[in-house]
Amino acid sequence: MKLTALWFLVLAGAVLCGVYSPGQAPAQPPEALTGFDDQSNGFSDADRRKADQKFFEEMEHIAPDGLGPLYNAQSCRECHQTPVSGAASQVSELRVGHVDAHGLFQTPEIPVNHGAEVIKDRTLVNDRAICPEIQEHAPATETVRTTRLTTNTLGDGYVEAISDETLLKIRKQQCESSHRKICGQAVKVPVPESEGQDRIGRFGWKDQHASLLAFAADAYLNEMGITSSLQKTEVTTICNPPVTTKIPNNDPTKITEPNSLPDPTDNNLEDIDHFAAFMRSLKAPARDETAATTPEAKHGADLFAKVGCSICHVDTIVTGKSPASKGGPGLHLDAVENRTIHPYSDFLLHDVGTGDGIAIALVEHFGRERLEKRFREEKATGTEVKELTGKREDECSESYQAAVAEGEKHPNLVRDTMCARNKIRTAPLWGLRLRSRLMHDGNSVQLDDAIRRHRGEADHVTQKFLKLKPEDQRALLAFLQSL
């Protein structure tokens, strides 16, 4: 690895993000707002943010159009709350599946109601249910199993505003600087609120979403069991049979689908509009400045770059234009645009050797109706997915995926997400010191253990860390503990 290229990546994030052209002096955009004061980053007015936060923290209950029938939590805040609403927590979820005779990942088939119904097309196994008949259990046939920790959404309004071009520049630079040992995969995913538009994913452990509205709708259905305009179909109707009524639903004893409807008394906003606006208003995690300014932590920051951690955990990125829709009054999209952030992530997918093994379940995250429409259109234009057979390894190779990222090959949602089943999004390290459990599965509780678990693409970087003197290892850990 060329040290000059590495330092370029770490210290010149503005260059990567294209904020100046040759011959011009670099103009660093203003820093993004950080802190844990539970105040807006400027995206929303005080009154609007207060209203959005109320929705984010509201406890759902078992009732018509309410919680379940399958769920994991009763509010967004239940999983996102340490140390403020919107942050992370120790809460994890279970995902399972299996590999078929052709080596392809398959989603599980989970029988419920004494086998009368089989839940398919999702990898999530919900831990809670509103009636005993539908409590899920992972069958013995589902031998690929993992847990996933709750992700941090602090600062995600800025992350949403990172352009695809910026992420691709970071990818190209890391490939070149590491001599192609480390090359993140950028997967283009649907943006459900913008029909026909795809964007590079950056939210969720598998980069399954590119917009916070889609991320909110996914969680509302799969974590709380509540449908919306972007996720209209329940996972199961047992214990929660749909009843057709006029819209809006003025009869609280009857159930409509979707459960959450635009409210004519609230600027026709849905719950998910409030969730997304709240997440967009969250300040980025602040560093512990007392710890960060110690000589040991400063030395650790140098070592973090020197051994190569910053190839994936990129410290400086500049945001572009926010793709957020207006979403009602009191919002200011420019508050998250053209800002300098320090997420310590490239928001790309990497194989770090932890063997997650779970591919994105497209129906679970985007809805069957939307996908069927997409595939019909792809078939009509001749760009539909071909059966993954003998060529799948070639199409999953770094060189092939590089061609996809650079526009030389046509992206394909099914193929590209299947290729990423053993990959995980680079965890943003801002706010790291607030985590009691580490890595995507939460199975590490010490920083040095989390580092040692990095293999695969990161193996040579891990080996460099292990070869450091003990005092240098402690310095690097001190730096991480300041984030």
Image (spheres, helix red, strand yellow):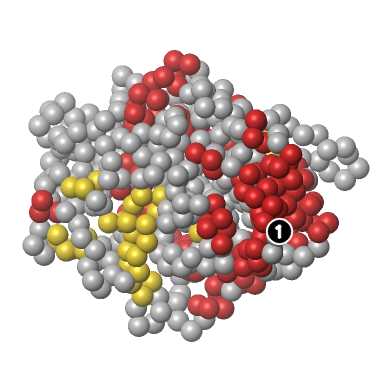
Question: According to the image, label 1 marks what residue?
Answer: 469
Vertical side of 335 occupied by 313: above or below? below
Mark 1: few, some, or many residues within 10 Å (few <14, many ≥20)? few
Residue with the most extreme front position: 470
x and y, in percent, of residue 139 in the image: 22, 68
Say what amino acid the circle numbered 1 marks: Lys
Left or right: 212, with 162 as reference point? left
Q: How many marks are shown on the rendered structure?
A: 1
Quarter in which the C terminus is drawn: top right
Q: Is residue 364 visible?
A: yes
Q: Position of residue 164 (x, y in %)?
A: 62, 49
183 sits left or right of 453 in the view: right
Tell me the quarter of the picture where residue 478 sits.
top right
Q: Residue at x 59, y 74 (%)?
A: 397
Left-right relation of 283 to 461: left
Residue at image position (74%, 39%) is: 295
Q: Position of residue 307 (x, y in %)?
A: 71, 58
